[in-house]
Amino acid sequence: MAANPGNKIRNAKLVLLGDVGTGKSSLVLRFVKGQFVEFQESTIGAAFFSQTLAVNDETVKFEIWDTAGQERYHSLAPMYYRGAAAAIVVYDITNAASFTRAKKWVQELQAQGNPNTIMALAGNKADMIEARQVPAEEARTYAQENGLFFMETSAKTAINVNDVFHEIAKRLLQGQQAQNTPAGMVLNQRPAERMVSSSSCCS
Amino acid sequence: MGSNTPPSRAALEPFATLDPAALAGLPVSSPLTKLLLVDLTLHDADELEVRTRDIALVDGVKALAWVGDSVFVGTASGYSLFSTTNAQGGDIFTLPESSRPPRVKPLSGGDEVMLLVDNVGVVVDRSGHPVGSSFVFNTTPDCIAEVYPYVVVAGDSKVDVYRRKNGAHLQAIPFARPGTGGLIVASEDAGIGSDVVVIATAYKVFCYRKVSAVEQIKALLRRKSYAEAISLLQEFEADGEISNDMISFVHAQLGFLLFFDLRFEDAVNHFLLSETMQPAEIFPFIMRDPNRWSDLVPRKRYWGLHAPPKPLEEVIDDGLVTLQQALFLKKAGVDTVVDDDFLSNPPSRADLLEVAIRNIIRYLCASREKDLSSSEMEGVDTLLMYLYRALNLVDDMEKLASSQNSCVVEELESLLDDSGHLRTLAFLYGSKGMCSKSLGIWRILARNYSTGLWKDHAILPETDSLETSVGKMSGEEIAAVEASKILQASSDQDLVLEHLGWVADIDQELATAILTSEMREKQLSPEKVVAAIDPEKVGIHQRYLQWLIEEQECDEPHYHTSYALSLSRSAMDAVRLGSNNEERNNKEFDSDMQFIYLLRERLQFFLQSSDLYDPEEVLYVISESELWLEKAILYRKMGQENIVLQILALKLEDSEAAEQYCAEIGRDDAYIQLLDLYLDPKNGKGPMFTAAVRLLHNHGESLDPIQVLERLSADMPLQLASDTILRMLRARVHHHRQGQIVHNLSRATNLDARLTRLEERSRHVQLTDESICDSCRARLGTKLFVMYPDDSVVCYRCYRNQGDSASPHGRNFRKGGIFKQSWLVSR
Ligand SMILES: Nc1nc2c(ncn2[C@@H]2O[C@H](COP(=O)(O)OP(=O)(O)OP(=O)(O)O)[C@@H](O)[C@H]2O)c(=O)[nH]1
Ligand SMILES: [Mg+2]
């Protein structure tokens, strides 16, 4: 658990949360494969991806959990955000309800998650401004108040997609210098050493 | 993950069926009962284990799995994990409302566990952390088994096969008769290393075994399910389940299949992915058997799924027939395996042929980079040329022909000739060292171009490539340039001289470059060359001789004479032309002057520097001309001092040059001769008193006054005569005085130096008890000592050893003298 010296790869568990159809899978697909599909199937359970990102002379390997937005799989979410080093809460700027849902996710993370988790708020589908329902200012203010960093993204046009991940990687590396504690979170009543074996920053 | 396309793979195949008769004695329903029993034993275990008391806290255990230290428990509300070491536990996740009962299935020999939520399988490791994407089964599983690398799921009257690694749905095995009771699948417990899965229905047990990667791909290829075969291949490749050789084998097989399906681009892409495929394997597509390379073609049949390679045209014709049939069948509503794109948009034969050739070209080009046997390399290059020609890709043909290549000339000669690709043929001959043939073609081309036989638009595509590199050039010029490239390197004298003429007619520069090239191994005979040069082409002749003399340092006198004569004639011509043409503007005039000046400079320089030419012969040629300086040089070579002086002093009136010449002669009588000329120029010219006075002024001191006086004529104006004499005498006195001054100055310096030396010698030095010799480090005490100019002090003994010239500080006064500011001469 010692601080990783330069050039070492740091593994980081990252989870995407948000309402159904906000574009979580699309954001991941854009980031990992540089692609976008108009008819992205709704995620069931969760999908896993990994992608490395170089920041200066360090490398972050994201282990990305793209969760399902469908309410039916909500109960699975804690398993995926448990021990996450970062979380991206996604809403759809053309859908006010999805923003409300995003706030709920933030609340849940604040209550249940690890206090060290880096949280990002992504207002996706920024390419569809004509259908905007959530003003960017409102989201930004909310993000500031809750200590999240905020970006409007578009998986379709790729705007800000890499930037969100890049910013997370940067904050991870900065945070890692500040505090060397593992980002792993101990589950209730769960013996601690279990969690350590696969928590997010061990390699 | 749940793909909508129906899976068509055969990852499992049946190999045995046990019907009740075969199972005589075995209770048919035993697997079912066993499973129920297992469920019961779990409760038993709960009671047996002391630690299970904690587990009992959980309401209604419905599923349970025990791997290593972890016990996974499924209840109606969700999944939890308990440790057998400390009986502590926690929730993994809760189940959504009204979901199917929990089900836990250990996978990979217990390293991981699958937890089901309806039809979704969430895989977690022994600590309950998720691993990989969720499985999405297309039915809610009744029973799950693992035969690595597959997960086999029974439910809804069928058995589905999924890929363990990514959850892809691979195969569905229907067991009709729904309602006849549940299906059960089972494999060896460990799941790894086992090949067999058993599927039990209410009345029969079916045994299935894993189909090897290769067999699966083969089956897909047989059905022409290319895309699936490829993705399967990629999966196996990523998992390392298939050897590299096999991967190459499959790509080659795929390539051939696609080729016969007229999908040439894809075919070649796969050929290129095959590392073991040999380029010769596709030769039969290009050239009909038997041919020069027939024996080279390996008889590889791969899986025998395609016809033996045959010429491209036939492949296309047959393919088109198949396509026609498929179209017909399709109209009749029969399914075919022919490419949909082709069916909806049938290609033309010509298009197909072109696409095929372009792609084979791509393959052959890539093959050129490989390490091939020389005969295979020959095949590749020759067939490449053959295909370029088929598409009339002139640029590519010429590029290939003019670069390092392995083309077999005999195979291409008549072909290229017939199709009029003469330039390509010329390049090819050139690159193969068949210079004479190559040159023959270039000569024909040059002639054709110049006679306008080939209209410009007709040659445009051919010149395109060259134009960019050499600027705008006519075809004729290009022919000459190419020929000269060959000729410059050729040592074949007859060949060079044979072609020199026509190249020279097009470009004299090129002809000169050919003659003066230093690339050839054996130099040409100057005699033959000089004889061969067209006497009209003075420039070539001159430049050749210049090169022979200046670069090759040839010392044959007659070449020097020829060169001198040639330059002289040119100079005379230039001068004559320059003076004839009156009506010219200043600019032209200037450039003419410049040209004449340079030419004469070259001539003068040569006449002066060479001692090998015959000056009389040259003199004879220029005798009538105005090339006076040249004449002076020649007379000088011949030792005709007086004539030289006459020319310099009287003709050119360059008294400076004349005096200079006198100085070179170095005898006093030369000045007197010059004075004579000044005072009596003859030929009706009056005496040149000014020049004479100048001469006396400059060189008076070396002239005997008596002789000078004798030469002053009686009719010389007294004023001038007195002036002359006065100057001469004054010059002598002045010379004498100058000498005196120099003498006195030297003396003063000498005195100064002596004074300084004296000062230097009378320096004081203070010695104490501590003073030591700088050399032997002994104390000086009262010993005799010596001080060097660099202030080092040594005892007398050391001085004797060391001598005057080197101080103990390592300074050598002979090599680097010492110099002090105070020694400067003050005046
Ligand atoms: N215009 C636009 N459409 C987008 C963008 N991102 C996603 N979409 C579309 O929105 C739809 C839903 O996208 P998904 O990526 O499946 O959304 P999701 O958040 O993963 O949904 P669940 O998996 O059901 O939770 C798809 O049809 C996408 O094509 C975007 O930035 N701009
Ligand atoms: Mg999704």
Image (cartoon, coloured by chain):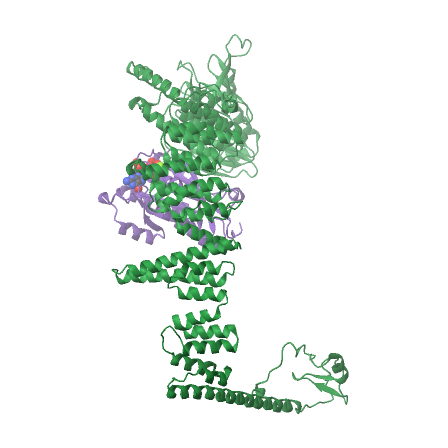
In the displayed structure, B198 sits above or below B59; it is above
Estimate the x, y position of residue B802 in percent, counting from the top left.
73, 79
- Residue placed most toward the observer, B54 or B402: B402
In the displayed structure, B398 sits above or below B263; it is below
Q: Which chain is purple?
A: A
* Quadrant in which ligand 2 is drawn: top left
Q: Which chain is green?
A: B
Estimate the x, y position of residue B332 in percent, counting from the top left.
29, 13
Estimate the x, y position of residue A82 in percent, counting from the top left.
44, 43
- Residue placed most toward the observer, B674 or B612: B674
Q: Is residue B163 visible?
A: no
- Residue placed most toward the observer, B812 or A79: B812
Residue at (50, 50) in percent of width and height: A7
Identify the image quadrant of residue B92: top left
Is residue B715 found left or right of B124 in the rendered image? left
Residue at (33, 50) in percent of width and height: A150
How many numbered tags mark residues here? Answer: 0
In the displayed structure, B370 sits above or below B331; it is below
Identify the image quadrant of residue B221: top left
Seen as rendered, the residue at the extreme top is: B21
Seen as rendered, the residue at the extreme front is: B714
Estimate the x, y position of residue B630 in percent, counting from the top left.
43, 64
Q: Is residue B172 visible?
A: yes
